[in-house]
Amino acid sequence: MADSYMGKFLLVDLTNEASRPVPTPQWLKDQFVGGKGFGAKLLYDLVPKGVDALSPENALMFFPGPLTATAAPSMRACAVTKSPLTGTYLDSFFGGRLGPEIKYAGYDGIIIFGKAPKPVYLWINDDQVEIRPAGDIWGTSALEANALIKDEIKEPEAMLATIGQAGENQVLFALICCEYNRQAGRGGAGAVMGSKNLKAVAIKGSRLVKVHDPEAFDKACQGACEEISLSTECAVYTDGGTSSAVPWSNEIGTLPYKNYYTQSDPQADKIGDEGQKKHLFLGKAACFGCPIRCSQMGAVRTGKYSNFITDIVEYESAALLGSNLDIHDPRAVAHLTKLCDEYGLDSMSAGGVIGFAFEAAEKGVIEAPEGITLAFGNVQGAEYLIRSMAFQEEDLGRLLSQGVKRASAVLGKQTMDYAMHVKGLECPAWGPRGTPGMGLAYMTADRGGCHQRGFMIGYDVGDEYNGVPVEMYQTKGRAGILIELQNYLAGTDALVKCDFSQCGVSPESFAAMLSAATGRQVDEDYFDLLGERIWNQTRLFNVREGFLAKDDTLPKRFVKQVLPDGPHKGHCVSEADMDYMRRDYYKTRGWDEEGRPEKKTLQKLDLDKAPVFMERP
Amino acid sequence: MAKTFFIKTNFDLCTGCSLCQLACSQRLLGGYNPHRALLRITHKTENLYHFPTVCNQCENAYCANVCPVKAISRDPETRALVVDHEKCVGCNLCHKYCPIEMAGVDPDLKKSVKCDLCGGDPACVKVCPTGALELAWRMVPDREEEAPNG
């Protein structure tokens, strides 16, 4: 039976410079589908308890899904590994053009183990897999490496995953840059790649990706595209990407300002869609197969930082390298973001770390080197920290490159009050004081402080849920809503969907596309149970690593310091709020009081008797 | 006068999304792969520009001119240059001499493939979300010719 899977994974052992295909088992497709599902199961099976994330024993994996590489609109892929920043399960999603190419080369995923004796890159051309010396390409930026490798292999249409200098130097929040300039950004997958001496993966494939029922599939895709074209939310992304979230977030009082000291910024509009349209945007670019085209390509043409090409400064980067640092020239924010992209640093964590460092410097805890000012509003100071972290040049850069959790542990107790992270992952740009549901989302996200596993903000500020108004500031009922969101998103992350297109595409359309692609009929409820299975599988990994109730918490600032101003003045997410929501969440999930999935929960999800993918190579 | 239809490309509107290539490869080969489609997108200057390239349906068509078995001829309706797979011997000379590499032998079919405008209603134009591809025509004087390589 034709389906949209390619039938095999590519297993690469860098230590022994060997690779081989491994069949994709039917049970794995049935129970975990692809993308995040494959990642959750395979990381649990292949990476035993307690493995150092930067050791050769950790696995670095790339997974597209059953709809990736087809005409299903806006599909992506993910990188999965154990995070060196948090020690948790990590998946990081990327658009662009790399994910589909994995399937065109004939694979449902790439699984990389070991450590090359010297810097190398992988060149996968269908069945031909070469491990080639990286030579002088080691030491270049993520974008330079892309161009150099395409030249070297003489394949302008090859798709690349690269790391920059930050990944080579194992900065704990280094990213993987995916064709083209799309990031598997969060949690330090780039450091894992660097620890394996792997500069890049280049892929090109000539295989056809076929679907089970082309006619039904075409109809389902047309339906999904129609939904996208009618969606007002998708239209906002087409118009200005996520940049318009800056003024919105400011209006609803969630925009971090000065390391989250408060959550409103009087100058926010300058770095949002208004400022970016004026100073940056020129035209639109789309990820593979996406009609939304949220990416606004442009250039900084004027001012101190000209001339360079820039992508849109999406919301998280604009907020965390902009308002969070009290920087409001969109050209300066684009400059800092581009440095992060080139050196290969997660711009979100970088913004969190720099905000932390600025506050610590203003409080006299750390000292700026001569000629450098570390203070809010100082672009040069931010630029200095980005470089010194990426290149590991100074003690301060080396310390901060480990993230705010480790840095605050070294700098002393008081700094922990404003080290803004959950489980070590620097927080996203949605301050949760005033939006307790979002707080719970951070507390319980599988990879630490993440907003993409269940975005509660809209409901927290008064949207209806299932036709029922959600009351502001209440903790009651938040767990139930969040769990439904987390399950559905984890289920559709197995496809692998895009967070933006899913604002338009209905569960019915996802189900219709998946059914026609694979030949296995599923309905619109399918993703809820699938997602619950995947969510519990990632929890099993985290519990095995020792993460329990004590870790499902928020940074002190969100808990102890009420907001001094803005729409939610006087609010925080108190200890009592956290306790209530955590208990409610665990109970609704079918987890014990420490957050361990109960036996009956695992039985319901068939996780108690799931086969093991393979013995560790 | 006669009408030659062709696909006009507007690079200023192209976002590089490849929906056109997906539709094309599915129609041609029954599966998806942009590298196997009959049109190409070149991404330049850090993804700032996207240049679609499609068959020009040339009036002086080198692909047809060089074909040793006269397998490439004009469709009477659209005047698109169409490969007759009964005649094609898979020599790939059409690929060698097309200046924009828009014709050539497919590795599975072992026959030359090139854009035939889907008979007049091109799938790529239909799925393009921005109008970067549009069906256009040019007027050409009536001639006795017809076999373009004759």
Image (cartoon, rainbow, N blue to C red):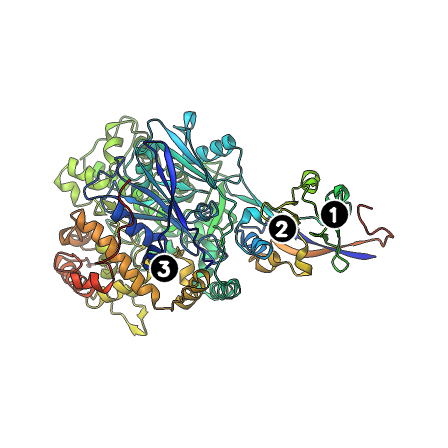
**From the image, which quarter does the C terminus of chain A lie in?**
top left
Residue A181 is left or right of residue B51, and the answer is: left
- Chain identifier of the residue bearing label 3 in the image: A
- Observer-nearest of A613 and A140: A613
Which of label 3 and label 2 is nearer to you? Answer: 3
Q: Residue tagged by mark 3?
A: A492
Mark 1 vs mark 2, CA separation in Å: 18 Å
Mark 3 vs mark 1, CA separation in Å: 46 Å
Indicate the secondary structure of the residue bearing disc 1. Answer: loop
Q: Amino acid at mark 1?
A: Cys
Which residue appears at 40% of the width and 64% of the height?
A520
Mark 3 vs mark 2, CA separation in Å: 34 Å
Q: Residue tagged by mark 2?
A: B10
Residue A176, percent from left and from top = 37, 40
The crowd level at tag 2 (other Cα within 10 Å; few <14, some 14-19, many 20+) is some
Q: Amino acid at mark 3?
A: Thr
Which of label 1 and label 2 is nearer to you? Answer: 1
Which residue appears at 36% of the width and 31% of the height?
A17
Residue A118, percent from left and from top = 35, 26
Residue A295 is left or right of residue A523, and the answer is: right
The crowd level at tag 3 (other Cα within 10 Å; few <14, some 14-19, many 20+) is many
* Tags 3 and 1 on a common chain: no
The answer to whether the residue labelled 1 contacts the one labelled 2, judged by CB atoms less than 8 Å apart, is no
- Chain identifier of the residue bearing label 1 in the image: B
Q: Residue furthest bottom?
A: A467
- Observer-nearest of A612 and A166: A612
Indicate the secondary structure of the residue bearing disc 2. Answer: loop
Q: Residue tagged by mark 1?
A: B58
The crowd level at tag 1 (other Cα within 10 Å; few <14, some 14-19, many 20+) is some
- Chain identifier of the residue bearing label 2 in the image: B
The answer to whether the residue labelled 3 contacts the one labelled 2, judged by CB atoms less than 8 Å apart, is no
